Amino acid sequence: MIKANVVLDNPIWKKKIKKPNNYIQKRLKILSQLSFFKNKMHEFTLLLTNNKKMKSLNSEFRKKTTTTDVLAFPFNYKVNKNSYLGDVAISYEIIDKRSAKSNFFIEFDKTWIHGYLHLLGYDHKKIKNFKKMNKKENLIINYFYKKN
């Protein structure tokens, strides 16, 4: 089973997601039905925060002085069956702004999935890798919203 430790760093998230931990656990249950994720015993932390914290993290760890939507901090690039993958941080303000043209939950799901895939070792530095990661993200999102 895939487990997420949801850390609510900023209560603004509760404006859109009343119980963030429950929401993520339900999503992970659906995710574990996909063949690629069956029998996985991964764990990660999901930090739900704001632009100010994201800017601080981006500055400290990536030497970039801007905010961003998602940051992933892999614990270990050698992912094995029972492992702690690392941490993902997400900015509320960016997700909320994007959702004005879409849906908050879809944008949130896209973002945490993107971070989670980074923890699994996916990246998008080269076009070939971008396509592979994007294909996996779309597969998951389509599966989530096909199921609901």
Image (tube, grey):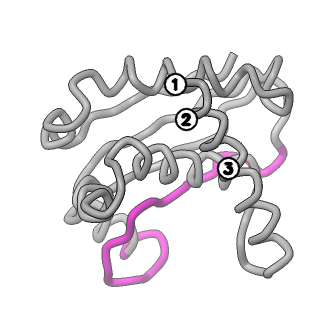
User: Element type at marker 3?
Assistant: helix
- Reading the chain from its start, which is encountered first: label 3 or label 2? 3
Q: Residue 68 is drawn in which quadrant? A: bottom left
**Residue matched to label 2:** 145
According to the picture, the residue beneath numbered tag 3 turns out to be 117
Kind of residue at badge 2: Tyr
Side of 65 where 123 appears, left or right: right
Give the extent of the magenta segment. 59-78
Residue drawn at x 81%, y 70% as measured from the top left? 129
For image coordinates 27% across by 21% down, the residue present is: 19
| Labelled pair 3, 1 in contact (Cβ < 8 Å) | no
Query: Are dots 1 and 2 in contact, CB under 8 Å?
Result: yes
Q: Nearer the viewer, residue 78 or 24?
A: 24
- SS at badge 1: loop
Query: Which one is nearer the viewer's eye here, 29 or 83?
Result: 29
Q: Which residue is mark 1?
A: 148
